[in-house]
Image (cartoon, grey):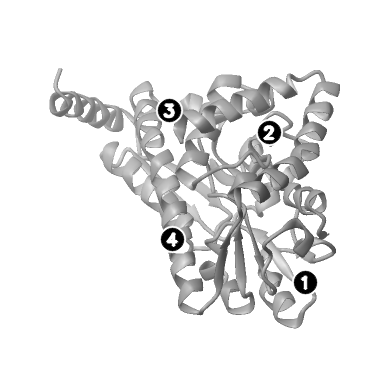
């Protein structure tokens, strides 16, 4: 059957499903990104696409900026039914998702597109029980977390003792590289850099424009060989999912499959904007030499080993997770 005929048949079935329903299925969607962020817009576009392909049988109201449930309560909000759908980071409830935490390790992600594909593929491969209480629609993840500093960093020696804004896993990366991690929310980073409270920050290049941090740093070190990512889930309340007609479930799955790339492309576009913006301000972008890359990779190995040991202690296949992720990164690269 051609794609056109298939879509026509599906649309007809959905119209019938919508007519069988007394009224449209109305869902709310909690998104932690602020409304103006490109990832919040991707969530809105996903919602509108679901509505279009179900011919109005589904209506989705998006609540950006954590206005329905805060970022760290988003997942529980979906489980309990406060929200029908939710998007947030696994890292905001670190320890609750020990399998998915492996995705965030400093394994050298080259882009948001690769990170998003790898994160979703890893979830499908492992099917971790920690996510069994929701319907996982897809996962996306930002491009490599890099080092942005007030003073240029060319080598590990330059980084020693520097106070670097970092949280969660990135704090462990900073410590392993010889810096001093300072925890703070992204919204406080600009002022802290401006006042010298911290001397740098770890994050994807998108923060340089999206959070205007290029205005208060002088250099970015291209340390993507130890680039970490932050995996973000898009999940649905299990009861609400099970109540949907099969035809509508199929639309959700089809659109979600497409939106892995939409989010990945959005992350990479935001990184490109950040690079252009920081260059316009005259900031340096510093590549590491091949020898220095190897030193940085060696320095962060204990972070990866620590995860493997902790996961193994919980009866999980920590080393297998790391090996799988490395293989997936190469496959999608």
Q: Which residue corresponds to mark 3?
A: 244
Q: Which residue corresponds to mark 1?
A: 198
Residue 42 appearing in the image: yes
Depth-wise, is mark 2 or mark 4 nearer the camera?
4
Q: Is residue 60 left or right of residue 31?
A: left
Q: Which mark is residue 170?
A: none
Contact check, label 3 and label 1, Cβ < 8 Å: no
Q: What secondary structure is marked by label 1? A: loop
Q: Which residue corresponds to mark 4?
A: 272
- Specify few, some or many for label 3: CA neighbours under 10 Å numbering under 14, 14-19, or 20 or more: some
The answer to which of marks 3 and 4 sits earlier in the sequence is 3
Q: What secondary structure is marked by label 2? A: helix
The answer to which of marks 3 and 2 sits earlier in the sequence is 2
Q: Which residue corresponds to mark 2?
A: 102
The answer to which of marks 3 and 1 sits earlier in the sequence is 1
Q: Position of residue 295 (x, y in %)?
A: 72, 46
The answer to which of marks 4 and 1 sits earlier in the sequence is 1
Front residue of 3 and 179: 179
The answer to which of marks 2 and 1 sits earlier in the sequence is 2
Q: Residue at x 70, y 73 (%)?
A: 151
- Specify few, some or many for label 1: CA neighbours under 10 Å numbering under 14, 14-19, or 20 or more: many
For marks 3 and 2, give the CA distance.
32 Å
Q: Position of residue 46 (x, y in %)?
A: 38, 45
The answer to which of marks 2 and 4 sits earlier in the sequence is 2
Q: Position of residue 92 (x, y in %)?
A: 71, 48
- Specify few, some or many for label 2: CA neighbours under 10 Å numbering under 14, 14-19, or 20 or more: many
Residue 74 appearing in the image: no
Front residue of 168 and 271: 271
């Amino acid at each position: 059957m051609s794609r056109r005929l298939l879509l026509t048949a599906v649309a007809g079935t959905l119209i019938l499903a919508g007519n069988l329903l007394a009224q449209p299925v109305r869902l709310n969607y909690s998104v932690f990104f602020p409304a103006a962020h490109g990832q919040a817009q991707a969530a809105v576009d996903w919602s509108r696409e679901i509505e279009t392909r179900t011919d109005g049988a589904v209506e989705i109201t998006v609540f950006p900026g954590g206005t329905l449930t805060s970022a760290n309560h988003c997942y529980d909000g979906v489980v309990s039914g406060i929200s029908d759908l939710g998007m947030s980071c696994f890292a905001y409830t670190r320890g609750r998702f020990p399998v998915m935490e492996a995705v965030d390790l400093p394994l050298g992600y080259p882009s948001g597109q690769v990170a998003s594909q790898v994160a979703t593929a890893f979830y499908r491969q492992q099917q971790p029980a920690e996510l069994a209480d929701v319907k996982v629609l897809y996962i996306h993840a930002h491009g490599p977390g890099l080092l942005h500093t007030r003073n240029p960093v060319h080598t590990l020696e330059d980084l020693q003792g520097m106070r670097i804004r970092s949280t969660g896993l990135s704090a462990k990366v900073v410590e392993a590289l010889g810096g001093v991690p300072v925890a703070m929310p992204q919204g406080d980073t600009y002022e802290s850099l401006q006042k010298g409270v911290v001397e740098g920050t770890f994050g994807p290049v998108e923060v340089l424009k999206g959070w205007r941090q290029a205005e208060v740093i002088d250099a970015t070190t291209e340390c993507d060989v130890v680039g970490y990512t932050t995996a973000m889930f898009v999940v649905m309340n299990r009861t609400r999912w099970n109540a949907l007609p099969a035809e509508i479930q199929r639309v959700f799955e089809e659109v979600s499959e497409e939106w892995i790339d939409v989010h990945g492309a959005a992350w990479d576009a935001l990184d490109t904007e950040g690079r252009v913006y920081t260059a316009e301000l005259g900031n340096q972008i510093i590549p590491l030499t091949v020898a220095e890359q190897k030193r940085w990779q060696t320095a962060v190995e204990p972070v990866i080993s620590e995860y493997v040991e902790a996961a193994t202690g919980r009866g999980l296949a920590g080393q297998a997770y790391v090996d799988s992720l490395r293989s997936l990164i190469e496959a999608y690269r």
